[in-house]
Amino acid sequence: MFRLFLLFLLLGAAPRAFALDSAHLELSVAVPNPVTAGDTVNFQGIAVNIGSERWLRDQYYWEAEIYDADKTYIAKTERLQGDIDIASGESAVANLSFGIPSNFGGFYYFRIYFVHKETRLTQSDYVLFRIIERPIVIAPPPPRAAVGGNFVFSYQTPDISDSRSAQATTILNMVGKAGEGTYLLNSNNIHDSTSAWKPYIIYGAYNTAGGSVSLGDVSPNFSALTLASQGMRGVEMMMQPKTELWNRTAWSLVAGRTISALTAGANTNGRYERLVYAGRGTADLWDGRLKTGVSMVLGMDNTASLSPDPKSPKFRGSSLRPQDNRVIGVNFAAKPWRELDVKFDYATSEFTENTELPVPVRGTAMQLQTGYVFTKLSLGASMLRASPKFVSFGASVIAADRISYGLQAAYRPVEWGDIGATVTQFSDNLDKDPKKTTSTQRLLSLSPGLSLPTRTRISTSWSQNTAQGDPLVALNNVSNSMSLSLAQSLGHQTISVSLQNSQFKDLNKVAHDLDTNTLGLSANLALGQSWRMSVGNTGSSTKDKVDGHTRNTNTQSASLYFPVIPGKVSGQVWGTNTLSKDNGSSSAADTKSWTANTEFTWQVNPRLAATAGASQADKTDAVAGSHTAQTGAITRLSWSF
C-alpha cells in the first residue's frame, strides 16, 4: 500500500520530478513487402514509452527516410503528428505511407524515427525491402562526353468515377558531362487538381575535381553534434581548392528546409517551416593522420509560413511560437596508425524557445569515439555528454541532459561467420537537480550471422533494453527483442523468412506488458527464361498481456511478369490483400482491403515503350459498417535518350 501511495505522489503531485524521456521501438516493418513500383508502401511502427515523461499529442511525431541499395538518402515521408497523448508504458502506433515512383526497382532500405520535442528518442536500423520493377525503357550509361537518361510520363486515375482523383507524373533522369565535370538529375513530379507542379523527389548534382553542387533532397553530414544525417530540401556546396596553399582544405555550405509548415488543427497547434543554414571548413593537418573541422549551423522557424489570424488558411495555434538555434562545433579525427581511429567533437549551442520574447539559453556537448581494427576483430568505444540546455536543430538524435557510454565489438573468425555485440548506457539529470529523478537506461545486443557456401544467409539478433529510476518505484521496465532471418538462393530462385519477437515488461506493474510478433515470408522466382514471379507475406501481432487487447495485421502480395509477344509486348499483374483487426475499446478496427492491377507494355522500339493498364481496389470496414470500391486506369509513356 505504501508503494502505491508513493507512486501516486510521484505520478500526480510532482509530474516534473521525472527526468528520463525514452522510447523502445517495438515494431518496424514495410507492408507490403515486396511492393510493386508505382504502388504505396506503408512503414508501420510501434514505440513504447519506457520513460516517465508523458508524450503530448502535439509534441511528438513519426517520420521515415528511404535509401537506395547503397544506403544513400533518397527521400522521406510526410511527418505523422501524434493524435493522442501517450503516458508512460503506453504505445504510439504509426502507419507512414510512401508512394513508390514507377521507375524504382530492386532493393531499398528505410529507417523509421520517433521524435518527441524535436529529439529522436528511438530509430530503427536500416530495414531492407524490395520493389518490383515495372517495364520502363532505361538506356545504358552514356559515354563520358554524351548525355543520356530517360523520361517517363504517366497519367493515372485511381477512381474513374471521380475526375479529381486523376494525377499525372513526370519523371526525368539525366547523366552527362558539362565542361570539366559530370552532372546528374533525378526528378519525380506530381501534377494534380491541387497543384500544377509538385516536386515529389528531386535531386541534381554537378561534380568536378574541385568540388560539387547538389540541389533538392540532400542529407549533409558535418559532425555528430552540429549537422548529422539531416534530410532536407535545399542546396549543398562542397569545395576543395587545388592551389598549393589551400589544397589540404575543404569547404561546405548548406541551406535548406528541414520541416514543412503545418496549419493548426484539432489535435495540433501546427508547426512553422524550419530553415537551416550551415557552413563547414576542414583541414588535413598531417597527411590524413590528423584532420580538423569547424562548423556552424543556424536554424530558425520561418514566421511567414503561418499566420496568427484565425481566419487565415495558414493559421498557427494559440500557443505555437517561433524558435531559433545556433550551434558552433569543432572536431578532430586522428589516425596515429592504420588500425586505430580517434574522433573528438565539441559544440556549443544557443536556443531561443520563443523569438517573440527572446530569452536564449546556452549549452554544450562533447563526443569521443575510438576504434581499433585487428585482422578478424574490431573494437570500439564512445562517450557522449550533452548538457541540460544543449539543443541542435541539425542533429536531433542528440538528447539534452544525458551522458552515454558505449562499447562495440565485431568478430569474424571465418569467412562464412561473424558476430557483433554492443553495450550502451544512458544516464540523465546531469546537474543533480533534487526535483528530478535520475534515470538510467541500458541496451545490450548480440548479433551472430552465417553466410554458408550453399548460398544460405542466416542472421540472428538479441537485445535487451532496461530503464530504471532512482528510486525504482518511479521507473523500472525491460524490453527484450529477438529476431531470426534466413535467405536461401537456389539458382535464380530466392526464398527468405524472417521472425521477430519483442516483449515489454513493466516491473512496477503500472504500465501494461506487451508482446509483439512479426513474420515475413517472400520468394522471388524465375519461371523459365522470361517469366518472373514474386510473392510475399508480412504479419504482425501485438498483445496486451494484462487486458488481452490485440492488434493484428496481415498482408499478402504477389506479382507476375510474363511475355505476350516476345520482344514486343509484355504483361504484368500484381495485387495485395490486407486484414487488420484491433479489439481495443478506444482503437477498435476490423478492415479488409485488396487491390488488383494489370498492365501491358508495348516496346515500340529499343528507346520507346507505351503502357496501358487497369486497377481495382476494395475496402470493407466492419466497425464503421462501410464498403468502398474503386476502378482505375493508367497510361504511361517512357523514352530513353
Image: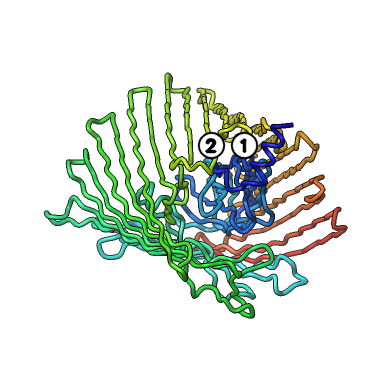
Residue in the picture at 18% in, 41% down: 287
Residue placed most toward the observer, 284 or 119 = 119
- Residue 167: percent from the left, percent from the top? 64, 70
Residue corresponding to mark 2 = 439
Which mark is first along the chain, 1 or 2?
Answer: 2
Residue in the picture at 62% in, 57% down: 80
Dots 2, 1 in contact, CB < 8 A:
yes
Residue 367, by quadrant, is top left
Residue in the picture at 84% in, 59% down: 627
The quarter of the rendered structure image containing the C terminus is bottom left
Residue placed most toward the observer, 17 or 270 = 17
- Residue 451: percent from the left, percent from the top? 50, 26
Residue corresponding to mark 1 = 474
Residue 615 vertical position relative to residue 308 in the rendered view, above or below: above
Q: CA distance from mark 2 to mark 1?
A: 9 Å
- Residue 155: percent from the left, percent from the top? 63, 69
